Image: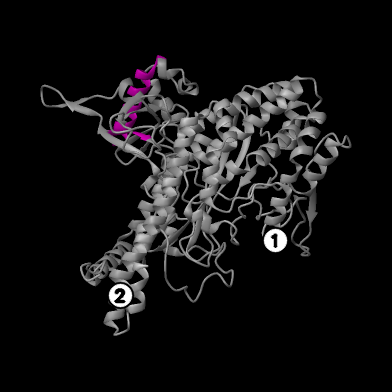
Amino acid sequence: AGSHPPFPPRTMLSTMRSCARNTMLRAVPARFMSTSFDAEFGSKLFSGNVADKYLKKHGESVELLSTPDWTTKKADKVAAAILDWGKDNGATVFTHWFQPMGSAGVRPGLTGQVQNYAFTFGKDGKPLWKFGADELLKGESDGSSFPNGGLRATHTAGGYTILDPSSPVFIRGDTIHIPTVFISWTGHALDEKTPLLRAEQALNKSAMRLLNALHYHVDGVQSNIGLEQEFFLIPRDAYARRLDLQMTGRTIVGKNAPRGQEMCDHYFAPLNQHALECIKAIQEEAFMMGIPLRTRHREVAPNQYEMAPFFGSASTQIDQNIVVMQLCEEIATRYGLACLMQEKPFADINGSGKHNNWSLGTKCGINLLNANQVTKASGSKDVFPTIITAIVAAVDKHGDLMRASISSPGNDFRLGACEAPPAVVSTYLGDSLTQFLDDYRNGKADEYKPAKKMLESGVEAVASFEVPAEDRNRTSPFPYGGHRFEFRAVGSAQNVSMVNTVLCTITAEAFDDMAAKLESGMKPKEACKETLDKHWKVIYNGNGYDPTWPETAVKNGVWRIDSGVEATEMMGSAKNIELFSKMNVMSKEELLARKDVQLQHYSGFVEMEALCFIDMVKQQILPALAEAGMDAAPVKKAPAS
């Protein structure tokens, strides 16, 4: 211990705290949202009117971007338009922007990128712009230096970034960001996004097959999500004093503050004014990039906040959420704050989640989880109950995959506490929908009409108002909320690509199973009855915090996996290998690679926490005891043991 200097030295701590305070004083308040600001909304996103303006200079229009065909036919025109747009916005650098595996909680922004200037120098020594179709569409990188689960090695390292046309190009600072997938020389997916896009393809194909079997014909189906991002903002000078927060994102040891959330006085309270300026700056920059980060509010724990955007396609929403996470971390420093994304940074107060609100929509905008809307659009009373039945079956059959998709050390601390569902994967449908499905499968009902009820405040001046007949159940990991399912168990630090890859894939398989029954001649009610009779056990409308529920769930055959490590191991089961393979989402090698990466990520985090604790004992706690003249012998033995 004597060979290790105290870390950080007290003089360094003092300097860091001083710098943090000075940063707070220099922080520039976010601009007031004015009419001139509105004109800048989305100006850093190559989409809509912004893209149309620059494409027209090259004889095209924004309609060119509506299908991916432009990547093989007119990529040179799009590249020229993007370069003009970039130069007008002071962006002369470009990067292929992708999502490596195993980056949650350790890689700022969760992304990989190599930044290149969009020019070289000509023979005359003047800048010569060089950004065409080749630079836009493809890049090459070393695939072996990222977590890859054995898919790449130093002597077989080729990796390629290929533009993803489903997610718009955007500008941040002086850099044009081009969303891409990341593929190995052998064709294996090395990233989080490629399996998601494959799962979306599978979902579209299977959903179209099911809807056609129900005589409802649409142009296509996609998953849409809305992500509620929770996080902590704490003073950076306090953060600078905590080696564990800096290294691992959470406190490993320490004393609880005398005031926590005992009084329930933080939730929806007025925002701390300093944190508010920081959050406004985050929103302002997000708005410039076309990210509709609409909602902000305080959360249950002290210094905990949440922001949430509008719904959108899963691929685009995930890209935007990753940008928001990076904005939160970087902009917080300007205001003398530190942003903590880790799921459980402090003991005995609420941790942070990222509620994954998930729905299915047709290309023409019909929400397939909205009973009234889909019944009217399809002209069929059978479409909605058939879709819900398939999703119930998917959750029951593949609850292990849903649990595996949210596994991390931080989330294991959070699950089952008072702010998150237990590690039992069930679904809440509400009494009304549950009763309807029961009646439907038994031939007693035809059409689901969501009930409403009127509430009175008892104040004559306040008009009565209409509310859903169903209450909200915040203890379920996957409750139905009227027009969507909410995967509440997702962790705040996650890239939710794997979460939505799982949801899309298991739903696609369930849709295929239902379609096969209908194509064989079964009536919709018969198919639903056979399926619901088998999978009814996964529907649970009670209190998920009831201490008897986990044991009851196991007796009923519902998935319960308390350990994130055990859940991750389930990814490699024969059932799951077959699922992803037959749905053309991941090969056996790709799935097992992700299992290995997730296990390495888990063990790596735990190891960092253990090593950090040892350093804190040796370099901070023992010197403090010695300085105070206290007996340090009992503490000295702890790290050694």
Query: How far apart are labels 2 and 1 at the CA level?
Result: 43 Å
- 371 vs 403, left or right, is right
Residue holding disc 2: 622
Please report whichever mark, 2 or 1, sits nearer to the chain's N-terminal start. Answer: 1
Task: Determine the secondary structure under disc 1.
Answer: loop
- 165 vs 539, left or right, is left
Q: Nearer the viewer, mark 2 or mark 1?
A: 2
Foreground of the two, 396 or 23? 396
Q: Quadrant of residue 615?
A: bottom left
Disc 2 marks a residue whose amino acid type is: Leu
Is residue 82 covered in magenta? yes
Within 10 angstroms of label 2, few (less than 14), some, or many (20 or more) residues?
Answer: many
Residue at the image position 53 percent from the left and 66 percent from the top: 349
Percent position (x, y) of residue 256? 47, 73
- 455 vs 498, left or right, is right
Within 10 angstroms of label 1, few (less than 14), some, or many (20 or more) residues?
Answer: few
Percent position (x, y) of residue 87? 29, 32
Q: Which residues are magenta?
A: 73-97
Principal secondary structure, stretch drawn in magenta: helix
Residue holding disc 1: 546
Of the numbered discs in the image, which one, if any, rests on residue 268?
Answer: none
